[in-house]
Every structure is written in C-alpha cells, then in structure tokens.
Amino acid sequence: MDESMVGIMEIVGPILLLIALVWLVMQRRSSGKTGRTEQATRELYAEEERRRRDGTDTAED
C-alpha cells in the first residue's frame, strides 16, 4: 500500500502543480494591470517628448 501511495503522489503531485501554475499565469494576465502599465508608459514618453521639444529636458552626456 505504501508503494502505491508514492506512485499516486508522483503522478498527481506534478499534475496539481501544473494546474496551479497555469491558473496563476491566467490570473496575472487577466488582471488588467498590463493596460494600466502601458498607459503609464505612454504618458511618460509623451511627457519626455514635450520636455524635449520645449528644451527643458536635462541631457546628460
């Protein structure tokens, strides 16, 4: 009986881990955080471009 439990754990354990990892990846992708991040990046680039055109940026060489 002990050997059969180990065999079941060796099969079921990785399957459960895979299911948990897939669920986690799907949750992170559907959270909508990516859209907010991309919008913030666009705003940052627009601000930098505005400062560059106005001549108020600080260029470091």
Image: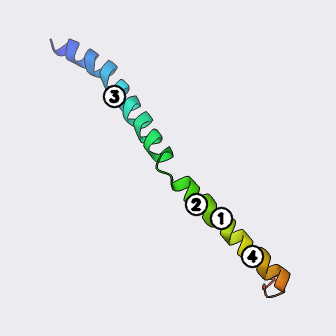
Q: Amino acid at mark 2?
A: Thr
> Mark 3 or 2 closer to N-term?
3
Q: Is residue 17 left or right of residue 49?
A: left
Depth-wise, is mark 1 or mark 3 nearer the camera? 1
Against 28, residue 1 (above or below) is above
Instruction: Tell me how far mark 3 sits from mark 4, CA to CA.
Output: 47 Å
Number of residues whose C-alpha sits closer than 10 Å to that of mark 3, classed few (under 14), some (14–19) or many (20 or more): few
Q: Are marks 1 and 4 in contact (CB under 8 Å)?
A: no
Q: Secondary structure at mark 1?
A: helix
> Which amino acid type is marked by label 4?
Glu
In the picture, residue 20 is in which quadrant?
A: top left
For residue 27, which quarter of the picture?
A: top left
* Sooner in the amino-acid sequence: mark 1 or mark 4: 1
| Secondary structure type for disc 3 | helix
Specify the amino acid type for callout 1.
Thr
Q: Which residue position holds label 4?
A: 48
Q: Which residue is mark 3?
A: 16
Residue named by callout 1: 41
